[in-house]
């Protein structure tokens, strides 16, 4: 198989698994999802009810850092282009996750929700596609 195709497949798999890892944490801690979005800058993601998680440091940490576990795939075979894309995507894509974590962690609990909601408003300005979700739980 051509190396370009391997890199493309690895890239798509890495993004998919990264976002699914966020989704596992969201479902496990029952954080209501407001919408699924596609933006110009962050690609694919979820807008959630910020009030349900921003004051819980454990959930905040898991939501933003758990997807970095995919970086360990490089250990399996560092020369394989499929697996090389996992740390590349998760380190560069995870930079935004890390920024949001540390930015919120440094704020007082009262300011976290306000800051998270303002961040969501900024994200809403760059949306290409959005699917609203009705939560019934």
Image (spheres, rainbow, N blue to C red):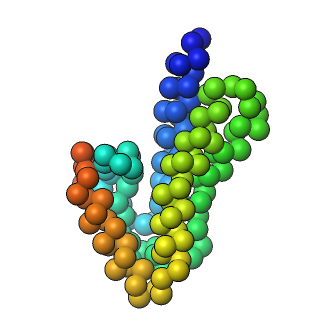
| Residue located at (42% from left, 74% from top) | 52
Give the farthest residue toward the top.
Answer: 1
Counting every numbered tag in the picture gives 0
Query: Which x, y percent locates residue 35?
Result: 30, 56
Question: Looking at this view, is 35 or 137 the one in front?
Answer: 35
Q: Is residue 78 left or right of residue 34?
A: right
The answer to whether residue 28 is visible is no
Work out whether 88 lies above or below 93.
Answer: above
Q: Is residue 12 above or below residue 57?
A: above
Q: Residue at x 47, y 53 (%)?
A: 23
* Residue 124 on image: x %, y %: 25, 59
Q: Which quarter of the picture shows residue 79?
A: top right
Q: Give the percent coordinates (x, y) of residue 78.
A: 74, 31
Residue 66 visible, this orientation:
yes
Give x and y (percent) for residue 56: 53, 78
Q: Quadrant of residue 14?
A: top right
Tell whether 87 sits left or right of 12. right
Residue at 38 percent of width and 45 percent of height: 43
């Amino acid at each position: 198989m051509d190396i370009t195709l391997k890199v493309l497949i690895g890239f798509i798999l890495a993004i998919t698994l990264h976002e699914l890892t966020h989704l596992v944490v969201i479902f496990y801690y029952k954080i209501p999802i407001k919408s699924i979005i596609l933006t110009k800058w962050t690609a694919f993601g979820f807008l959630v009810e910020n009030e349900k998680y921003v004051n819980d440091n454990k959930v905040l940490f898991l939501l933003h850092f758990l997807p970095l576990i995919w970086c360990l795939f490089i250990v399996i075979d560092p020369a394989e282009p499929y697996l090389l894309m996992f740390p590349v995507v998760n380190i560069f894509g995870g930079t935004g996750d890390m920024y949001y974590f540390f930015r919120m962690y440094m704020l007082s609990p009262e300011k976290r929700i306000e800051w998270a909601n303002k961040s969501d408003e900024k994200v809403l300005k760059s949306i290409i596609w959005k699917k609203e979700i009705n939560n019934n739980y």
